[in-house]
């Protein structure tokens, strides 16, 4: 048929024309990371996955140090509750090697799984290790470094938001991670004497703070150990370093401010 070749070429050009995709992207409203409404379509499915899949019993574990310290007082284990018996040194001697092991566990986990998320947790574990060693600058530095890691994590999650998928998350591990964060928060609340109105808190304050912080370190290590150490076939919803999904997400992220 006359002109058949030119018609076929025209249709082929329409099918692969990048301008058509560009026009489609321009028609969508630009998303901003500071708008809660722009996060909602990505966060709500993750929240639904948490409620459906994550075990909740680990969230009670941050209360275990309180029970332990009170039990130690009743049983007369002075090294675990009495400042006069050196309870602070007892917990600090445990904390340093515990955090070294925890940091190594997260580094290995990040390397085995090729996971950027685990690498961030390894960096956070290293920050806590430096804090436990107590060299100059770590008191304020731990807060600055933690804030930097948090900002990096949020920016990374925003860039790869299209790939957030509840099916690619180990929810048992995330439950232990939530318990770890809660334990650190409880330790900070105790440090600020939020419970000084409770009778007997003054004598147990130091032991409660140190024991809760040590328990948080232990939970952090446990979080690194739970779950499968095998890398998922396609990678996790964010961690896959290559492949069509990664390239598509990177392209989408580049076009959104």
Image (spheres, rainbow, N blue to C red):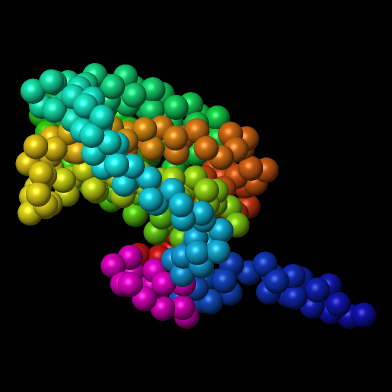
Query: What residue is drawn where x is 14% and y is 38%?
Result: 204
Q: Quadrant of residue 143?
A: top left
As rendered, which of 31 and 52 lies closer to the eye? 52
**Where 256 falls versus 150 (above or below)?**
below
Residue at the far front in the pictured view: 75
Q: Which residues are magenta?
A: 27-41
The one of 103 and 11 positioned closer to us in this rendering:
103
Left or right, 17 with reference to 131: right
Q: Nearer the viewer, residue 141 or 25?
A: 141
Quadrant (top left, top right, bottom left, bottom right) of the C terminus: bottom left
Which x, y percent locates residue 62?
A: 33, 45
**Residue 128's x, y, as percent?**
26, 32
Is 48 drawn above or below residue 95 in the view shown?
below
Residue for point 24% across, 48% down: 185
- The reply to whether the magenta stretch includes residue 78 is no
Whether residue 34 is in magenta: the answer is yes
If the image is split into quadrants, where does the N terminus sit? bottom right
Judged left or right of residue 180, residue 52 is right
> Which residue is nearer to you in this view: 18 or 209?
209
**Residue 239 visible at all:** yes
User: Which residue is located at x 39 percent, y 59 percent?
Assistant: 158
Q: Residue at x 55, y 35 (%)?
A: 113
* Image x and y of residue 179, in percent: 38, 48
104 lies above or below 73? above
Q: Position of residue 67 (x, y in %)?
A: 29, 42
Q: Is residue 35 above or below residue 76?
A: below
Q: Is residue 162 visible?
A: no
């Amino acid at each position: 048929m006359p002109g058949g070749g030119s018609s076929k070429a025209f249709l082929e050009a329409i099918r692969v024309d990048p301008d058509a995709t560009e026009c489609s992207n321009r028609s969508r409203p630009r998303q901003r990371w500071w708008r809660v409404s722009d996060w909602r379509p990505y966060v709500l499915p993750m929240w639904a996955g948490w409620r459906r899949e994550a075990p909740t019993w680990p969230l009670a574990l941050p209360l275990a140090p309180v029970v332990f310290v009170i039990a130690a007082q009743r049983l007369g284990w002075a090294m675990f509750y009495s400042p006069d018996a050196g309870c602070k040194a007892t917990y600090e001697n445990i904390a340093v090697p515990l955090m070294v092991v925890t940091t190594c566990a997260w580094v290995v986990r990040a390397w085995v799984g090729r996971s950027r998320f685990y690498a961030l947790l390894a960096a956070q574990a290293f920050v806590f290790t430096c804090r436990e060693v107590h060299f100059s600058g770590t008191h304020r530095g731990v807060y600055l470094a933690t804030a930097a890691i948090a900002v990096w994590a949020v920016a990374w999650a925003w860039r790869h938001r299209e790939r957030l998928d509840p099916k690619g998350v180990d929810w048992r591990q995330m439950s232990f991670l939530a318990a770890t964060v809660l334990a650190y928060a409880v330790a900070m609340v105790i440090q600020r004497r939020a419970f000084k109105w409770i009778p007997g808190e003054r004598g147990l304050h130091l032991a409660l703070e140190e024991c809760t912080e040590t328990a948080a370190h232990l939970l952090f290590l446990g979080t690194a150990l739970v779950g499968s150490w095998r890398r998922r076939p396609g990678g996790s919803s964010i961690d896959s370093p290559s492949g069509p999904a990664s390239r598509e997400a990177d392209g989408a992220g580049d076009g959104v401010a």
